[in-house]
Amino acid sequence: MASRLEELGNERLRKVSDTVYQEANPPNDRHRPLEWRRSLKHVLFPLKNIEIISNFNVQRRAFLYGHDAKKIPWQKQIEPKMETTRFITALVDKEKCRDFIFCAVEDAENNGITRLERSSNDTQVYLRAGKPTEGNEKFPSGLYGGSCYHFPQENRLCFQIYVPESQLNEILESLGRDSKLQIEVGVEFLSFSYEVDDALRDPFDEQYLFIEEPDSAEALVSFVKISSHVGTLPDSPNRPIELSGIISAFRTLTIAIWVLIAVVAYSLIK
């Protein structure tokens, strides 16, 4: 029996609107094609291979159109840009991640037909400091944005997500204190999901989602969870004392005392 991943690899869909895909070849006895519908889904990404990247910008070359660069001395084409930016990059630990994300790719052999492909490499996550939205007719104020897209050169999905600068600084400080810090990122992800899965799956079951290729999908971070192992090192002077050794020494001392008492009592009687 084919696994769910194999079934999805053989799936063929037809786009009917910006928010709906349908089965391209539904069974004849079905009254309508089943659908994949776009909505916000919560995904949880346990991270591994976490790195801190720092960029130190000093100066840059001004962007000039046409032949303007030839008319301006090179010294005046350089302008200062003193700026330091830091961000976190990591890979999603697929052994711990419950969900599967595909890309919808148009089938070259069948016009208008879409197939689902899964990236061969681990998903990359970039966690950056961002600025909240100011609010308009489309978005409320105070949101921190983000996106998911397919990076074809490396055949991997990438999530660019933003958090308040103060929170990113706290995460960076925690990583500086504990290089083994564990990080999980919760993301609200605008993606397509199968209507049957949405109706039948339990909240903690795995999800099978897809985004459109080559478009990007909205992905907003809901939380970042950091955790570290609290305890003493094996060579710490404060480590727990081995009780079995103490008990054995106490028994030996007790026997020696009783022997000494017996010797003294015998000498007094004699």
Image: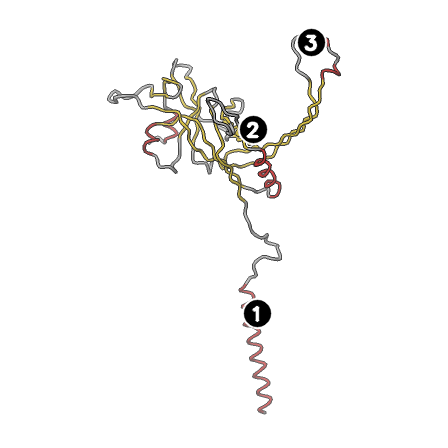
Amino acid type at mark 3: Asp
| Residue 178: % across, % down | 59, 43
Answer yes or no: is residue 93 visible.
Answer: no
Where is mark 1, residue-wise? 249
The Cα atoms of the two marked residues, 1 and 2, are separated by 65 Å
For the N terminus, the image quarter is top left
Q: Are marks 3 and 1 in contact (CB under 8 Å)?
A: no
Residue type, numbered disc 1: Ala
What label sits on residue 136 in the rendered view? none
Can residue 268 be spotted in the picture? yes
Q: Is residue 234 above or below residue 125?
A: below
Question: First in sequence: mark 3 or mark 1?
Answer: 3
Disc 3 crowd rating (10 Å Cα; few below 14, some 14-19, many 20+) is: few
The image shows residue 97 at horizontal and vertical percentages of: 45, 36
Q: From the viewer's perspective, is residue 85 above or below residue 113?
A: below
Residue found at the far left of this picture? 29
Circle 2 sits on which residue?
131
Secondary structure found at label 1: helix
Q: Mark 3 — residue?
A: 68
**Mark toward the start of the polypeptide (2 vs 3):** 3
Residue 50 located left or right of residue 8: right
x 48%, y 27%: residue: 140
Which mark is in front, 2 or 3? 2
Give the mark, 1 or 2, whose residue is nearer the N terminus: 2
**In the figure, is residue 60 to the left or right of 227?**
right
- Image location of residue 54, percent across then percent down: 64, 31
Q: Residues within 10 Å of mark 2 (few under 14, many from 20)?
A: few
- Residue 4 spot, x, y in % from top left: 37, 31
